[in-house]
Amino acid sequence: MAELRIARLWDTDSPRVTRRAMLGSMAYFALAACAVGPAPTSSGDVNAAKAVNLRDEPKLNFYNWTDYIAPETLPGFQTVTGIEVTYDNFSTNDEMEAKIASGQAGYDLVVPSDNFLRRFLRSGLLQPLDHDAIPNLANLEQRFVEADYDPGNKYSVPWAWGTTGLAYSKSQIGGDVTGFDAYDLPNAESRSSILDEARDGLALGLLKLGHDPNTTDAKQIDDAANFLLSLKKKLGQITSDVIEPLTSGQVRLAQAYSGDAFQAKAANDDIGYAIPEEGGLSYVDLLVIPKDAPHAGNAHRFIDYVLGADTGAALSNAVRYGSPNAAAKPLIDKDLLNDPVVYPPEEQLEKLPFTKDLGGAAEALYADAWTKVKTG
């Protein structure tokens, strides 16, 4: 059996939350023994894949966010399939998009956020999925089958979902954290951060000013940028890597993805997380197959593996994000499943919209405004 090889682009710790290793079911062993034809290499009809009955070489090149996988996911997949995994990490959607758009990356699986999926599709960077090769698609909750970012999961399968909010040190912040006014607390001065993502970062400014975080109004977007430029004077940094800074005490307040906040809390019980009273964003991170993936058949096998009940539950328990996998729910830690900041009630979800696809002109406004924030 091929040796598991995990390569990282960034010098990061492995996930700090350890879990009991889980074995795949005997049914999956039977499935893994069958050849899976490669998916199409363009955005054409997926039936092209079914006409090919060749097994990929036993390799998979996987590009994922930092600290966003269970310790047993890759070893378990290799045990089931014998496929060698090369695993690289990125820290922002922009970084990942640049590499995939170059056409030189050679990745078989990538995990963009839902708003970047639409950008990938407009650029023709993805291939459609062969649903016959992913029988565990039946395990998805209906909310993630009907989502407007990819109705019917034609190009993507959800990896995990969460919200943007505020993570903080309960003992050091020196006040209540209920909304974005927390950045004005004296103890947050130079010890706070916002996310290094244009739509997420600017959403903080838009929400603080009472605007829709999916606005296309140029003045509102510019107003949000100006607010963030003012806020920037109080910040310690703009970064999407918040787990270690929070757990070490370097950062006392951070705009954060919910799962990162919960991972930080698992390492340091002093960390709290709040969904701001002004609101936030919901997001889904997605498994997609680039159009030039060299091992697309193996990518389908990995997607099906992750959608298994045991594997899906282990992933959610480790990364502390919401799971889109209905079959995994009975196996997810009850404290996680019953936590309203992980699975917000319906009335709160109304203030946590998904990031909408606003089209190229509006996205350019956000990109320009974010450049203003980063360089100003």
Image (cartoon, rainbow, N blue to C red):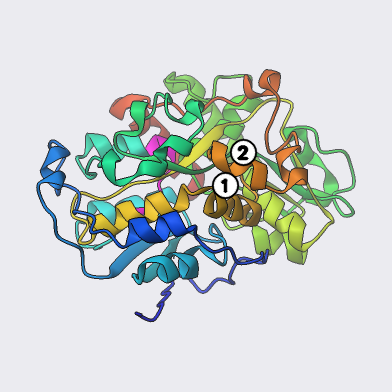
Q: Please tell me in which quadrant of the rendered image residue 5 appears.
A: bottom left
Q: Is residue 260 left or right of residue 302?
A: right
Magenta stretch: includes residue 111 = yes
Q: In what element is the residue under mark 2?
A: strand
Q: Residue at x 38, y 27 (%)?
A: 357
Which amino acid type is shown beneath numbered disc 2?
A: Thr
Q: Position of residue 104 (x, y in %)?
A: 20, 62
Q: Is residue 140 above or below residue 52?
A: above
Image point (54%, 50%), residue name: 312
Q: Using the image as rendered, state which of residue 176 and residue 231 is in the foreground.
A: 176
Which residue bears the numbered disc 2? 164
> Is 194 contained in the magenta span?
no
Q: In the visual, does 365 lie left or right of 351?
A: left
Magenta region: which residues?
A: 108-116
Residue 100 figure quarter: bottom left
Residue closest to the eye, 22 or 277: 22
In the picture, which quadrant includes the N terminus?
bottom left
Residue 233 showing in the rendered view: no
* x, y percent for residue 185: 82, 43
Q: Residue 18: in sight, yes or no?
A: yes
Of 366 and 290, the residue lying toward us = 290
- Identify the residue under disc 1: 195
Marks 2/1: CA–CA distance:
9 Å
Q: Disc 2 vs disc 1: which is toward the camera?
A: 2
Q: Of 318 and 236, which appears nearest the observer?
A: 318
On screen, residue 130 versus residue 203, left or right, reads left
Where does residue 323 sit, x and y in percent of width and height? 57, 42
Neighbor class of circle 1 (other Cα within 10 Å; few <14, some 14-19, many 20+) is: many
